[in-house]
Image (spheres, rainbow, N blue to C red):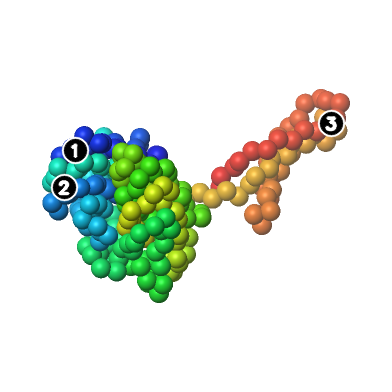
Amino acid sequence: MRGALQTATSTAEPSSLAINTPSGFATGDVAVICVVGSSGWTGAVSATGLTAVTLSTPAAAMFTQILYGTAGASPPASYTVNVAGPVFNIAMTLGAFSGAAGGASTWDPNAPAVSGPAAASGLGGAISIAGFENSSSQATLVNGDMMLWLVGGRVNSPTATTIPSGFTGITAIAGAGGVVSTFAYQLQASAGIGGTQTGTANGSVFDWTCQLAALTAASAAPSYAPPLDAPTLRCTELRRTSRGCRGKKRDVCSSPASATSVSSWSEGKRCSGGSQSQLVSLWR
């Protein structure tokens, strides 16, 4: 997750609305916006640099869309979402993620569908989706994906949506009798099915739509192996001892990782005996 989840709302029948990107938003990060509006929508939601996906909607009085894209060389401080309307109320949530594959590999296993089984929809307070593509058998293919639970709702006197257990999320609310946009995410450490994910739309709920999708994790960077002629650490301890008066000082370097010891000798000065040691790192 890059920074914090962002929200933007309006009840002023906007034809466009800006939403900030989080602090630290960087080239290669993947941004996802869940856009929810009520009444007057004629079908088009867009933002420069982002791709739009329309979720199935339970009623003509509400729409939910996803916008997503990969930040280019000059990541914007905000995205302006254009809505063909007018739309009475609009609520948006945005999440940005580093470590995602982005581009043509943004989604695992498939991009959210424009309509049909990819989105669950219904009436009432409980919001439940059976898994990716709203299927109990659909599975991701890549370890370390980020699961997204995205909800749009038309609710009277709404409060924040209760998200599924294990997820982290935020809700944007527009209007007392308006709409809510909820964005929740959870790391999927091992590839597999998404499982049934259930939350609650709080308030007098007219209808809702829900999407469970997964952002593909980028391939892990290869581990570094030093070249054959690079120095390796052979010694970790240098112990200096003096053997009696007018004795010699001996530096002994030894390490469990080394099969040999390295010694050096030097003439000592008149002394009263004793010894001292210190830890060093010697490369050989």
Type of amino acid at the residue the image marks with label 2: Gly
Residue denoted by label 1: 13
How far across and down, in percent of the image, does residue 52 sit? 20, 54
Name which residue lies at 35% across and 35% down.
23
Dot 1 or dot 2: first in sequence order is: 1
The residues bearing labels 3 and 1 have C-alpha atoms spaced at a distance of: 86 Å
User: Picture quarter containing residue 265?
Assistant: top right
Type of amino acid at the residue the image marks with label 3: Gly
Q: In the displayed structure, would residue 194 be above or below residue 70?
A: below
Residue denoted by label 2: 40
Q: Say whether marks 3 and 1 touch (CB < 8 Å).
A: no
Q: Which element is circle 1 on?
A: loop
Count how many numbered circles sit on residues in the image: 3
Name which residue lies at 60% across and 50% down.
234
Q: Which element is circle 3 on?
A: loop
Dot 3 or dot 2: first in sequence order is: 2
Name which residue lies at 25% across and 42% down.
90
Name which residue lies at 39% across and 64% down.
129
Dot 3 or dot 1: first in sequence order is: 1
Q: Which mark is residue 274?
A: 3
How far across and down, in percent of the image, does residue 187 sit? 45, 55
Asked whether residue 163 appears in the rendered view, the answer is: yes
How far across and down, in percent of the image, does residue 172 sit? 35, 41
Observer-side mark, 3 or 2, equals 2
Q: Say whether marks 1 and 2 touch (CB < 8 Å).
A: yes
- The residue lying toward the viewer, choosing from 114 and 104, is 114
Type of amino acid at the residue the image marks with label 1: Glu
Q: In the displayed structure, would residue 243 be above or below residue 186?
A: above
Q: Which mark is residue 29?
A: none
Q: In the displayed structure, would residue 62 be above or below residue 244?
A: below
Q: Which element is circle 2 on?
A: loop
The residues bearing labels 1 and 2 have C-alpha atoms spaced at a distance of: 9 Å
